[in-house]
Image (cartoon, grey):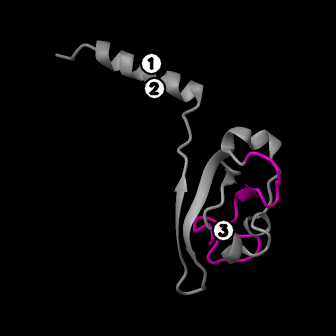
Amino acid sequence: MFNIRAEAAFSTPSPLGTLWATNINNPGDTIAATNWAALEFTTWTAAYGGSVGNNILNRDAVVHLVDDDVYLDLRFTTFVGGAANGAFAYQRSTPLPEPAAFLLAAAAAVAAAFRRPVR
């Protein structure tokens, strides 16, 4: 797996721009985005114990999208390694909007509702 926006192919430490936490590199901790401050993050491969193909399925993970400073819960449900024929499927949480973004959207909606048509 690699970050198509930042790299042309997989290489160590792909995927670029991400850091990962699992129960392999955080034994005994709750693996959830809401617990991000208590977790240690590392590369994707290291977070899965150096053996992604053997350790990735149905394991809770938190991925940190570094550039956006977003944390997501993630769980791979399918993973087929391979340079040319790899495939994967996953479930992930949806981040909640930041309070400031929510307030701006609400203010814009109210303003639009009260705007009079121009004649």
* SS type, badge 3: loop
* Residue 95 % position (x, y): 56, 41
Kindly report the distance in space between the C-alpha atoms of the residues bearing marks 3 and 2: 38 Å
Q: Amino acid at mark 3?
A: Ile
Inspect the magenta stretch and tell me whether residue 23 lies in it: yes
User: Which residue is rendered at x = 55% and y = 87% of the image?
Assistant: 84
Q: Amino acid at mark 1?
A: Ala
* Residue 74 % position (x, y): 60, 55
* SS type, badge 1: helix
Report the quarter where the N terminus lies.
bottom right
* SS type, badge 2: helix
Image-quadrant location for residue 114: top left
The span shown in magenta is 1-30
User: What number is the disc on residue 56?
Assistant: 3
Inspect the magenta stretch and tell me whether residue 7 lies in it: yes
Front one among 79 and 104: 79
Q: Residues within 10 Å of mark 2 (few under 14, many from 20)?
A: few
Q: Residues within 10 Å of mark 1 (few under 14, many from 20)?
A: few
Please name the predominant secondary structure of the magenta segment in the image. Answer: loop
